[in-house]
Image (spheres, grey):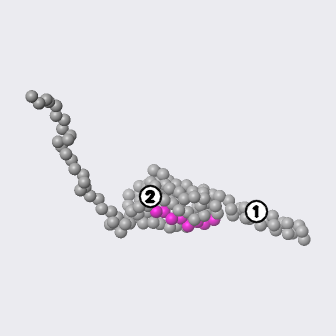
Amino acid sequence: MKELILGLFVILMLARNASAQKRTVIGTVKAQEERLPLADVTIKIFRALKDSVTNSDGEFFAELTSGNASTTFSYSGYLSQTEIVDFNTIFNAVLAIDVQDLSGVIVNAIDVQRNRMNSVCCSGSKS
């Protein structure tokens, strides 16, 4: 009887350790319209050791602690996207432009002035 209980305990501990193993997920985030990589996209992964950010090539990697994880990709001017990262080790995302978000952006050049008089250098002396 003791051997049966000990055997079950060992099996439970091995199953617990197997489910708590870390795994690395890598991928790329691109813009939907141009299919160009997006840099500095925030990637929040539930059950990850820490959040991730894409590099200049749109690539990211994250370590998961176990199983499936809800992953949210967010970037200013683009719609946030939430996906489930299951047992895939390579995961790619495509973000669409958020037209509503861009309507709040105002670009103006009111304070920009060009003064040609300051850019011309005059030399001479008063007589």
At 64% from the left and 63% from the top, the residue drawn is: 66
Q: The residue tagged with tag 1: helix, strand or loop?
A: helix
**Above or below, comparing residue 40 to residue 47 in the picture:** above
Q: Is residue 71 magenta?
A: yes
Q: Which residues are magenta?
A: 67-74
- Whether residue 32 is visible: no
Q: Amino acid at mark 1?
A: Leu
- Whether residue 73 is visible: yes
At 68% from the left and 62% from the top, the residue drawn is: 20
Q: Amino acid at mark 2?
A: Lys
Residue at which label 2 appears: 30
Image location (x, y in percent) of residue 19: 69, 64
Q: Residues within 10 Å of mark 1 (few under 14, many from 20)?
A: few
Viewer-nearest residue: 81 or 93: 81
Chief secondary structure of the magenta portion: strand
Left or right for 2, reference 29: right
Residue at which label 1 appears: 14
Image location (x, y in percent) of residue 55: 48, 51
Q: Is residue 28 magenta?
A: no
**Above or below, comparing residue 14 to residue 121 in the picture:** below
Image location (x, y in percent) of residue 127: 9, 28
At 56% from the left and 67% from the top, the residue drawn is: 70
